[in-house]
Amino acid sequence: MGPIRSIKTCLAKSFQFSGRASRSEFWWFTLILIIVLVGVLLLIDISALGFDFEGTAAYAPVADTLGLLTLPAGMAATARRLRDLGLPGWPAALALVATYATSFIPTTPSTTFAVGLDWISYVLSAVNLAVLFIAAFPSTPGPNRYGPPPSEVTP
């Protein structure tokens, strides 16, 4: 599956957590989404709002809005990709939502809550990196308990 078809498929299946997603569908979507979000963050948000190199980044409303709008598609693609490997998909989708949600909680470095939130963010980031690592494995050949291989399913 190519990049354009992958984007169309993942956006069309934004709320479809059943079935399976091929490696190419997941990785093209993920790669393009990351490039677009980072590009928007760098080109629009930081240039328009500024960036403080003392350790605090400016609030990035355009990138955050775009991320929020594509969150369902990312969750569904991740869940379907893990199902393609024969694994349950809901834990990864929840970790993705939790990671995104923790970025909106305001904290100050001097509070105990901020330190606890940092650790939660680190653990969630590690879980998301593990999911990306697992998503690189080849698909389960033939049908599995989540359905036929994505190559046998017509879009």
Image (cartoon, rainbow, N blue to C red):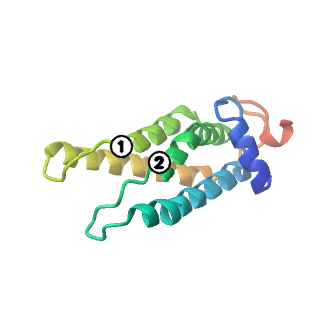
Badge 2 element: helix
Q: Position of residue 151 (x, y in %)?
A: 83, 43
Q: Residue at x 31, y 42 (%)?
A: 105
At a point 64% along the width and 36% down the height, the residue shown is 83
Q: Is residue 41 left or right of residue 33?
A: left
Q: How many marks?
A: 2
Q: CA distance from mark 1 to mark 2?
A: 9 Å
Choose top left, top right, bottom left or bottom right for residue 75.
Answer: top right
Sequence order check, earlier mark of 1 and 2:
2
- Quickly name the residue at label 2: 64
Task: Check if mark 1's residue and mark 2's residue have beta carbons within 8 Å.
Answer: yes
Name the residue at 78% across, 40% down. Answer: 150
Query: From the viewer's perspective, is 110 left or right of 71?
Result: left
Work out whether 1 lies above or below 92. Answer: below
> Which amino acid lies under the numbered mark 1 shown in the image of this protein?
Phe
Q: Is residue 10 left or right of residue 96?
A: right
List x then y, in percent, for residue 127. 44, 47
**What is the crowding at mark 2: few (fewer than 14 residues within 10 Å), some, or many (at least 20)?**
some
Q: Residue at 36% across / 43% down in the picture?
A: 104
Counting from the top left corner in percent of width and height, residue 68 is at 51, 41
The residue labelled by disc 1 is 104
Secondary structure type for disc 1: loop
Amino acid at dot 2 = Asp
> Residue 22 versus residue 69: which sits nearer the camera?
69
* Residue situated furthest bottom in the rendering: 53
Nearer to me, 114 or 145:
114
- Crowding at mark 1 (Cα within 10 Å: few <14, some 14-19, many 20+): few
